[in-house]
Amino acid sequence: MTAPADGTQRVAFDRSNPNTLADLLRSIALGSFLQGQVAQVRRALSPDALGTNPQNLATLDAVSLPNSGKANTILRATVRAGGVTGELTPVAYGATPATTQCAVGPNGDLVFLAADAITDVDVNYIPERGDVVDTVFPVVTNVLTLPASITDRHVVLLAEVEALVGTTTGQKIILVPGAGAPAAGQARLDVAKATVTFAGADAVTRARVKLVVVAAEDLAAVLEADETII
């Protein structure tokens, strides 16, 4: 059945005129769409071999995902080999998985309990589409305040944070957004996702952050906009 000719970009996609299709695909940033909008499948992963990463707790094995395609939700995870096997139970975003569980880490990576020693797992997940902002800011009294040029784009998550100047420098473990100062070696967004807070003991005064913000190409808006390519 052919969609009604309502003059939108969506109908132009349905029509798929070869003379205009390239411009239409460019309008939705097709590469970013495929990485961050379509459900993803990772086969035969070995979290045990990948081990920990600096953004997540040391008790967790982490599958690091590209910053422009972090995970939003795990749909299913099936283990063929490891200290546990069979179906894992996905738990809430940012929760620390127990044995036979998996989760999306606070920074959007796929995380598993290291003690489960999983060596072969298939994971189906929905990605978190967005654009990546990578920049350096001062930290005042343990708080990095993001400028309006970033918050106006609506921060989705904090993918990485590195203390460049301070008592304790280097990559920080990322916690779920919340109030209050984290423990030493950790950092978190506030609930409004407008600041990044560091531990007082780390005395950070300058930091680099990698943030995922809402994608510039709003898929719904592009598809429902008036057709511009005839």
Image (spheres, grey):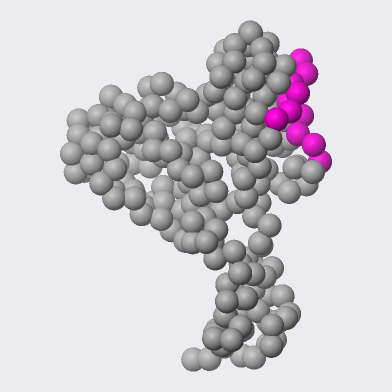
Q: Position of residue 188 (x, y in %)?
A: 62, 27
Q: Residue at x 59, y 64 (%)?
A: 29
Q: Does 176 lie within the magenta span?
A: no
Q: Position of residue 167 (x, y in %)?
A: 64, 8
The answer to whether residue 59 shows anywhere in this view is yes
The image quadrant that residue 46 belongs to is top left
Q: Position of residue 158 (x, y in %)?
A: 60, 36
Residue 80 versus residue 149: which sits nearer the camera? 149
Q: Position of residue 35 (x, y in %)?
A: 49, 56
* In this view, 4 is above or below 38: below
Q: How many marks?
A: 0
Q: Does 137 lie within the magenta span?
A: yes
Instruction: Give the magenta range.
Output: 136-148
Q: Residue at x 78, y 18 (%)?
A: 140
The answer to whether residue 143 shows anywhere in this view is no
Q: Is residue 100 left or right of residue 103?
A: left
Q: Residue at x 52, y 61 (%)?
A: 31
* In this view, 170 is above or below 214: above
The image quadrant that residue 150 belongs to is top right
The image quadrant that residue 51 belongs to is top left
Q: Is residue 125 left or right of residue 181?
A: left
Residue 224 versus residue 101: which sits nearer the camera? 224
Q: Is residue 60 left or right of residue 211?
A: left
Q: Residue at x 45, y 23 (%)?
A: 57
- Residue extending furthest right? 148
- For the C terminus, the image quarter is bottom right
* In this view, 56 is above or below 65: above
